[in-house]
Image: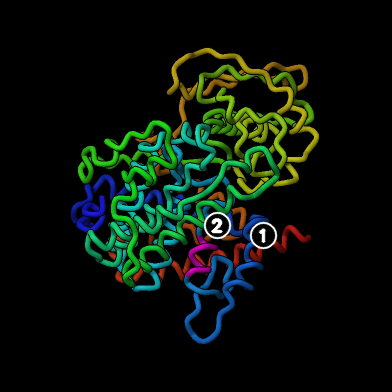
Amino acid sequence: MAEFAANSTFESLPPYFVALLSVFILDTFAVMLSGAVQPVYQSAKKAIEISHGVSGNSTYATLDGTQTTLSGQMYMMGLAAGAFEFDHVIEGSHPSSSVFPALFCVAAAYGKSGKDLLSAMAVGYEFATRLGYAVGGEDAEEETSFHAMINGSPATAAAVGNLLGWDADTIASAIGLAASSSSGLYAWINTEAMTRRTHPASQGQLGAEAALLARAGIAGPPDVIENTYGYLSAFSRQPEPEVLLENLGTEWMSAEQVLKALPVHARALGFAYAIDQYREEHSWSAADISNVTLYAGPPTLDSRNWILEPMSLSTAQYSIPFGIIASLVTDLRNPLNMNDALVFSPTARDLAANINSVSISDDPTYFYGYMTFNIGTEFANVTVDHYPGLPESEGYEQLAEEKLFAVLRALGLEEDGDDLRNKIANLMDLDDVSTILDELISLGTIGTRNYLAGSEN
């Protein structure tokens, strides 16, 4: 895998995957801008200002314009991407929030080109995805209590090694250092903790720093993945190491990302999206909703995510029933309507606590179904028969574009959407990606100011 990371080039990437990488960046920019206004980001900014105090001219800006170190920038960019349960996902892996932000910061700091960034991003995405499959994805979380986002650190180390042109031995050592420090516990799920928001940021920051340490001569175990005392042994009860190398470099497993149209759990997306479509032709008051019943298959009815009384915004977004109820109670076409006020709304909590469910399929891949509810005395039936954020679905790229514009609109930045979208589409022609990072920071600074000022008023 280190050889793969060392030898992958932009020219070796298939055109369809290059196009998808641009879609993923478009999606991630939307996620980061929405994440920068979240309470966990604003709180962490204060801590970073203390722990990463800067002096002199070598400073780097976070998404809201705060000046810090490169390490602080990587962490805060990752926190923005992971702060709102809005990033695309595959098999328990979140490369958009764990790998991309740190990699993007390093690419900008070193004046790398768009092609350099895309090549390294492909390596990081593929590495994270294959590690996710190799440890068993979300199943491993239940078996070991480790959060699946731990794959972000070795994946970022591999990506940074590719970006900076290092050889396979150096990259293997970097992966060894990063994986040896991989961590993240699932204990947030039954508490009010915000740790899930911090995991991807920590992993990306750690992975990039591990890569720089390896380059400086600090050796990590080069066989850390398969070592008897290594990554797979620690994080999986039934590892599948063969997935790591199967058609590596010719088959891009990371192309199969699920895009989130709404800031809810991936398994709630089909139902929440269908409600949004229904809302375009109907209107109602949340107080008039009652008798909500879901008719669904195993992904939607998974007991791990069937949290009826969430204790925080984080667990509410992880809760399938609450995510669906949220789309009934408020219009999530403005994603920032998913907030603490909604989580503790008596109407939303009562509906979520009393939601009914009926299993209509045993197919573990069955993402669809239908739902019924009452609007006053009227009976409503909403069918869930498609979702454009699934891989290879019609409307996949359009969904990412609409998501970006929805976030920009919520932050008072809609007029900047076309320019940002076009720059991402032409990223491969960019000589220095720091220019697009600077533009993202400018938008984030203005958008954060707009949103926080509106909240105070």
Q: Nearer the viewer, residue 179 or 432?
A: 179
Amino acid tagged 1: Tyr
Position of 224 relative to 347 (above/below): below
Q: Is residue 107 visible?
A: no
Can you identify the residue that label 2 sits on? 79
Residue depicted at x 45% and y 21%: 364
x and y, in percent, of residue 100 in the image: 42, 56
Mark positioned earlier in the residue sequence (1 or 2) = 2
Secondary structure state at the residue bearing disc 2 = helix
Q: Nearer the viewer, residue 316 or 291?
A: 316
Can you identify the residue that label 1 sits on? 451
Q: Residues within 10 Å of mark 1 (few under 14, many from 20)?
A: some
Tell me, yes or no, whether the highlighted magenta stretch contains residue 18. Answer: no
Amino acid tagged 2: Leu
Residue depicted at x 69% and y 22%: 355
Instruction: Tell me where the magenta segment starts and ends, as one range.
Output: 71-77
Q: CA distance from mark 1 to mark 2?
A: 18 Å
